[in-house]
């Protein structure tokens, strides 16, 4: 398969699929640390053991603080801290999502609007941001598609005999 043909096929897969389920599954697979090869060797328990050996006093203070503030057993606190050490960003996102579900918000936008001092201004700012970036995305994809079509028109594929 020639590179222009492969590029067109790739663009077809990206833009012509009826939903984002395909791309969302791929993104979720790469963003989930439990699905990577590294997690088979290095997980929350290993991160916890390293942290414990590195600074035992701070480790104990952290575990005791988690046990008091979240009313957890020692095993639960250690598991929670190990999950945090393994993937701090994912841990924070998951905690925010759990909090949002617990309170009953549908999504982060609803939560941001509800917690805002000026809900209408916040909603307008979010909508403006989404509209502006949607327009930018369409413009970028249009320019890229036009460039690819121009290239394939000016450089037709001619098989070598």
Image (cartoon, helix red, strand yellow):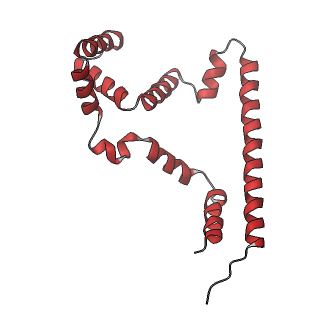
- Residue shown at 77%/72% (left/top)? 153
Residue under the point 29% across and 20% down: 77
Residue shown at the point (66%, 15%) measured from the top left: 116
Horizontal side of 49 relative to 39 (left or right) equals left
Residue 42 locus on image (x, y percent): 28, 39
Give above or below for 149 relative to 141. below
| The C terminus sits in image quarter | bottom right
Q: Is residue 101 above or below residue 2?
A: above
Query: In the image, 32: left or right of 68?
Result: right
Give coordinates of residue 111: x percent, y percent: 60, 22
Side of 135 where 97 appears, left or right: left
Examine the rendered structure and indicate whether residue 68 appears above or below residue 75: above
Spot the residue most to the bottom.
161
The percent coordinates of residue 31 (x first, y second) are 46, 42
Q: x, y percentage for residue 137?
A: 72, 45
Q: Residue at x 74, y 25 (%)?
A: 125
**What is the number of callouts on the image?**
0
């Amino acid at each position: 398969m020639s590179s222009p043909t492969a590029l067109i096929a790739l663009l077809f897969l990206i833009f012509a699929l009826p939903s984002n389920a395909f791309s969302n599954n791929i993104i979720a697979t790469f963003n989930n640390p439990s699905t990577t090869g590294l997690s088979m060797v290095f997980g929350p328990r290993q991160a916890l053991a390293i942290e414990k050996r590195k600074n035992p006093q701070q480790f104990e203070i952290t575990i005791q603080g988690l046990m008091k503030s979240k009313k957890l057993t020692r095993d639960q606190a250690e598991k929670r801290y190990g999950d945090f050490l393994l993937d701090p960003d994912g841990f924070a996102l998951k905690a925010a999502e759990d909090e949002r579900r617990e309170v009953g918000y549908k999504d982060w936008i609803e939560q941001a609007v509800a917690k805002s001092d000026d809900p209408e201004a916040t909603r307008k700012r979010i909508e403006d941001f989404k509209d502006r970036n949607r327009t930018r995305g369409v413009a970028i994809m249009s320019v890229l598609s036009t460039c690819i079509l121009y290239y394939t028109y000016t450089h037709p594929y001619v098989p070598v005999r």
